[in-house]
Every structure is written in C-alpha cells, then in structure tokens.
Image (cartoon, rainbow, N blue to C red):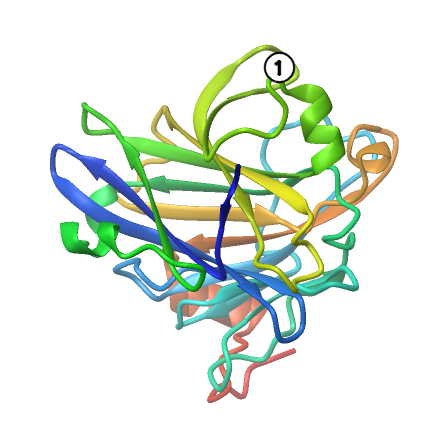
Amino acid sequence: MPHQSELFIVTVRTPSGLRKVFQLIFQKRDGSLFVNFPYFERTDGLLSLVTWPAGYRGEYLDLERGGKVVSHLVKYSHHPDGRVQFSQDGKIISAVKKQGRSITTIEGHEFTFQIQGVRAFKFAEESELSVKSQRRMPLCFEFKEEPVALKFLSHWHSRKDFAERSIDGVTGPKAIIQSNDGKQWLGFLLSAPDGHPAADRVMTLSCEIVDRLSEDETLMVFAGGFDEKSVVGDFQKETTFLTLKYPLRETEKVTERVGSIDLKSRSVV
C-alpha cells in the first residue's frame, strides 16, 4: 500500500552524503498540497507564470515574461479548488498564480522538479530516516554514483485507475514506475492522510539521473500547475504553467526589468 502521511521529506543519498531536497505537505485543515523548498543554499530566484504559445515547437521559453524576482525560498501551493500559486507567509506577495485543476480529479502530471549539484542542499542525519509516522515520513532515493543532476516527477491517479495500470493492483510503497513510452524509474507510492480530500488517491514520485541542466554549478527548477491533457497535448492551443528557478543571475538587473514580489519591495508591478 502507499505511504500515508501529512509530511513527506524527500532525501537523496549519494557518495557525498545524505541530503534533504524538498517537502511534500498534505494539509488536512484546508485540503491543500504544498511542495516546499527550504533546503537550497541560495534564496535569490525567479517565479514565473509561463505561457506556451499555440503552435510553438521550440524548447526554451522566456521566464522573465510573467515572472517576478524573490529573495526568499518559497512553497508551491495547490488548493482543492484548483488554484495554484507560489507563496511564503509574511515574506512575499502571492502574485504568481493561476487557476488549475482540482487535486481530486487530476489524472496525470502534478509537477516536475529538477536539481543540479546535490551539495547545495542541507545535510540530513541518518537518524532522521528512522522517524516515520502518520505526521512525518522520510523518503530516500539512493544513488551509487554522484549525479550531476536529478529529475523528480510526480503524478496523480485515482486508486481505480492506478490499479488498472498495475499488474498487482495498488502495491508499494516502493514501485517501478513506467511512463507511456515504456521508460521505467524506481519510485514511491504516496497518499494523503485520512480526512484529506485526496486521501483516496495515489501520488507517484520518481527520481532519475539526468544530464547537466545548465552551466550553473547549482540549480533548482520546478514546474507545476499544468492544464488538462487535452490542452497540454494540443500544440494548436496555448497553455500556461508555473515555474521557479534558483539561483538567479544578475538579480538587480532582472528586478529592474520585471519587479520583485518581496513584501519589503516597492517595485511590484
């Protein structure tokens, strides 16, 4: 059966040690999902509402258009009604947002999170992996070689849909996760705690080594808040999603161009 908890702490173990990378939080109070990024060494970043134009076949999009600068680490919030946004209470204005899909009905992609340079994330003590409960659950992806970069993928499924895809039904909590093109990764099956709107659903979380993402020594890039498959898969339709990227090069120059959403800033536009 899937791991069930309110808080999942995602870690990676490599030859350089054990690192905490991000958190998944299923908040029972209002039924939201949070993806929190408190462990990265840099706090200067760019948050963006990205538009993929209809008919565009390229690979690179302008993140400054629809973007705002921040000087704090933030969290991605996905609310039960489908609203998605970046936020950090008391530190930023939640201006980078959109109306997305309800977490109770999504079938498919929830988010992609990529990192480069695991040494940029906080060390974790081995003892932290032994504390497991309905309130807190550590997850550990292990790699025998030091990865240049890693990609985490998360997908939502109803238990019925996931059982139909699986040879053995809803098993777990560790599983071999296979994409539509047949590629396989080791991953985890997760579930929100009882009382959460998504408690009867299964989230898959996988991780794989990928090639270098950029010339930066360290990097983290997140994308979420995707539209329905019928929109994302149709290149003749415009689609939008949210991204974050840390660290940010030439922070002052980018701030002059797009503004900041730090609460102390007066340059928000």
Quadrant of res 214: top left
Looking at the picture, tell me which residue is in the foreground, 197 or 71: 197
199 vs 205, left or right, is: right
Q: Is residue 87 shown above or below 84? A: below
Q: Position of residue 182 (x, y in %)?
A: 58, 10
Looking at the picture, tell me which residue is in the foreground, 56 or 20: 20
217 vs 113, left or right, is: left
Quadrant of res 84: bottom right
Which residue shows up at 81% across the image and 41% down it?
Answer: 228
Residue indicated by mark 1: 167
Q: Is residue 206 shown above or below 165? A: below
Q: Position of residue 260 (x, y in %)?
A: 52, 75
| Amino acid on which the number 1 mark rests in the picture | Ile
- Tell me the quarter of the image containing the C terminus: bottom right
Which residue shows up at 63% across the image and 20% down it?
Answer: 166
229 vs 176, left or right, is: right
In the image, farthest residue toward the left: 16
